[in-house]
Image (cartoon, grey):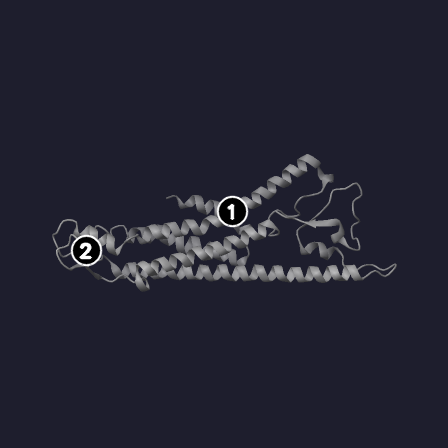
Amino acid sequence: MNWGIFEGLLSGVNKYSTAFGRIWLSLVFIFRVLVYLVTAERVWSDDHKDFDCNTRQPGCSNVCFDEFFPVSHVRLWALQLILVTCPSLLVVMHVAYRELQEKKHQEAYGEDGGRLYLNPGKKRGGLWWTYVCSLVFKASVDIAFLYVFHSFYPKYILPPVVKCHADPCPNTVDCFISKPSEKNIFTFFMVATAAICILLNLMELIYLVSKRCHECLEARKARATCTGYHPHGATSPCKQDDLLLGDLIFLASDSHPSLLPDCPRDHAKKTIL
């Protein structure tokens, strides 16, 4: 599998991510994808060939291997990395959609027609929800796979010897796993990096939600101040800073609003997508 394609696509996510998201992306590619490609695949490449049971019964080794290894570590990790990285591509696609819509709007109405988005890459409206949903999905996938690994391999440990009594084995036989210590080391490493990624996703989610709640409170305070403050001949305190609280655009009209109106939100609307 060519993981370079995923790396090239997800590298564009950096400029739309927070500091937690950049750390997560670095951790995924340096400590998960790179370790998976360089070492993990080689460690598990001979797991079936070197799985040896103390019996000559035909088919016994294959049945015992399938019983103890229902799904290979390598294939589970590959599926996990694909599912974890794909939601980030949705963020890039959403930003590309915004940029395309902005380009079409500019071509149709020109510079005098206003703008659909002040900053297409700013996490506002639908893009904010896309980003938040991607964080929830990534954390859920890692948690689900950690549970699956623990279900197949209790405590994430591979014992050096396993007992097998499945048919067509004549009796209970001993089967030996190749390089169990080395495999346990890499298993614990991948589990630890997945747990750190879950923690980073949750921290970024808390940061985004708390920041959004703070902005909503500030916007309500500014709106209340703007509504209740109308002395004659005085300048309203809700100035241009009120516009910076959200991803706002001016409505295209014949009479453009003044640069600093008393209530700038009367002449603006939030971007939905």
Q: Is residue 146 visible?
A: yes
Q: Is residue 234 left or right of residue 31?
A: right
Q: Is residue 57 above or below residue 191?
A: above
Q: Is residue 27 visible?
A: no
Q: Residue 265, how many percent across, how many down? A: 74, 53
What amino acid type is highlighted by mark number 2? Ala
Q: Residue furthest bottom?
A: 155
What SS does tag 2 mark?
Answer: loop
Mark positioned earlier in the residue sequence (2 or 1): 1
Tell me the residue that label 1 is attached to: 90
Q: Residue at x 25, y 56 (%)?
A: 68
Please state which of the two labelled residues, at mark 2 or mark 1, is closer to the viewer. 2
Question: Which quadrant of the figure contains the N terminus?
Answer: top left
Q: Marks 2 and 1: CB-CB under 8 Å? A: no
Q: Depth check: 32 or 130 in front?
A: 130
Q: Residue 231, how many percent across, how many down? A: 85, 61
Q: Is residue 23 left or right of residue 164?
A: right
* 3D distance between C-alphas at marks 2 and 1: 45 Å
Crowd rating for badge 1 (residues with CA inside 10 Å; few <14, some 14–19, many 20+): some
What SS does tag 1 mark?
Answer: helix
Q: Residue 97, how many percent across, how many down? A: 58, 42
What amino acid type is highlighted by mark number 1? Leu
Tell me the residue that label 2 is attached to: 166
Q: Residue 189, how many percent across, how many down? A: 36, 60
